[in-house]
Image: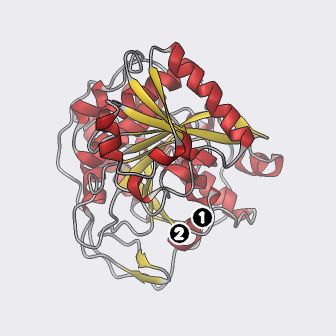
Amino acid sequence: MQRSHLLWNGPSRGATPAVTAVPARASRPVLARATAPASPMAHLLDAGVLPQQQMMQAGKLSSHALTSQYLARIRSLCSIGARAYPGIEINPDALKIALEMDRERQGHKVRGPLHGIPVVLRDNIATGDRMTTRTQAPAATHARCDSFVAARLRAAGAVIIGKSNLRQWAAVSVPHASASWAGLTILAVDSEADGSIVAPASTCGLVAIQPTGRAAAGQAGEPAAAGPMAPSVREAAWLLAALCGDTATHGAALDVAGLHGRRIGVARGLFGRCAATDAVIEQALQVLRGQGAELVELPPASVPGALEELLRAQALDALVGPTCHAVPPAHAIQPQITVPAGAVRGLPVGLSFIGALHAEAQLIAMAYAYEQATLHRRTPALPSSITLALRLP
């Protein structure tokens, strides 16, 4: 889908809505079977954050209605016995928070591009509400207060609609991002553990950003890094800006000329796992050259070394290669962004940009330029049985 090049210029202010503590439930809420008829707004669930915000600004959509539609889709998928995706624990206060965001908008108070937009968190990100936090499966607790990540999202006006089950999320590659892939949410926040942000997102045809080290996490006991998953670079940048509290820097990074003049190292050490995937990435490299980037071939032996030293020694802005499921130890704390680059036998393939510490804005600019030059991302085609149950248009 062609996306607008408009940047968000709305205000970013306002206090975080309070979430009242209540007695903990003994188990996760049971999702009831959806009985509501198909909604004429259903197409907006897959349209993206920008169209959703434009509809809300025009008074044609509310956060409450949007959140209700996502909840109905989640319940519909659960009702047909789809157990393969990571189970979502619904936030019982989601609709209440959405209503509060609508009241703020009616009072001409809009916190930013995430105002009123539903978001799903990974289950080990603490929220001081009625949802459980699983810091070590299968243990589950009720946090006394929001984590740094959750507090940032609430301050940005996001509606935390639920949590994705940590044990199932970490089991295999695809379920990491399947909540977003299946349209159960437009945005998701994952925590980093051996590529668990970028690798599953690439498998599901999503954009994801692994931030520098603890750039988006601050309290003891939180994940080393928490990063966004989204359908586009623009939306991922908005979500990262909310997590890091740096809206100006990440918003300005959306530049269609972001590859021009960049010196980028081709990380051959990340190739060789799949010939078909390598072929897709070779085509991506041609696009990078066509967008004005200078590519520098790096022998496989050069990649496992200290990445910061490699970038400085070769005067590189970033490394590129296929998004991998096994992240080299030297890359574990480096910022990385994956963007859809095509498909192999119908399965998405991601192109990764890996950069210097705290160079997220630079990586976003390069990834955005590549995304806009190719527009590889497609809304996933679900099996007909699920499509019918979800009443997709």
Give the residue at x 22% y 39%: 246
Q: Position of residue 351 (x, y in %)?
A: 55, 37
Residue pointed to by mark 1: 86
Coloration of the structure image: secondary structure
Give the residue at x 40% y 71%: 131
Q: Is residue 176 above or below residue 41?
A: below
1 and 2 marks in contact (CB < 8 Å): yes
Element at badge 2?
loop
User: Which quarter of the rendering shows the N terminus?
Assistant: top right
Q: Position of residue 8 (x, y in %)?
A: 32, 26
Q: Amino acid at mark 2?
A: Asn
At label 2, counting other C-alpha atoms closer than 10 Å, the crowd grade (few under 14, some 14-19, many 20 or more) is many
- Residue 128 lies left or right of residue 374; in this view the side is left
- Residue 216 lies left or right of residue 26; in this view the side is left
Give the residue at x 68% y 46%: 37
Tell me if I can see residue 274 in this picture: yes
Residue pointed to by mark 2: 165
Q: Is residue 142 above or below residue 307?
A: below
Q: Is residue 226 above or below residue 246?
A: below
- Name the quadrant containing residue 124: bottom left
Tell me if I can see residue 115 in this picture: no
Q: Amino acid at mark 1?
A: Pro
Q: Position of residue 55 (x, y in %)?
A: 45, 28
Viewer-side residue, 95 vs 332 = 332
Q: Position of residue 239 (x, y in %)?
A: 36, 42
Instruction: Give the residue furthest to the right.
Output: 384
Distance from the alpha carbon under mark 1 to that under mark 2: 5 Å
Q: Is residue 203 above or below residue 282?
A: below
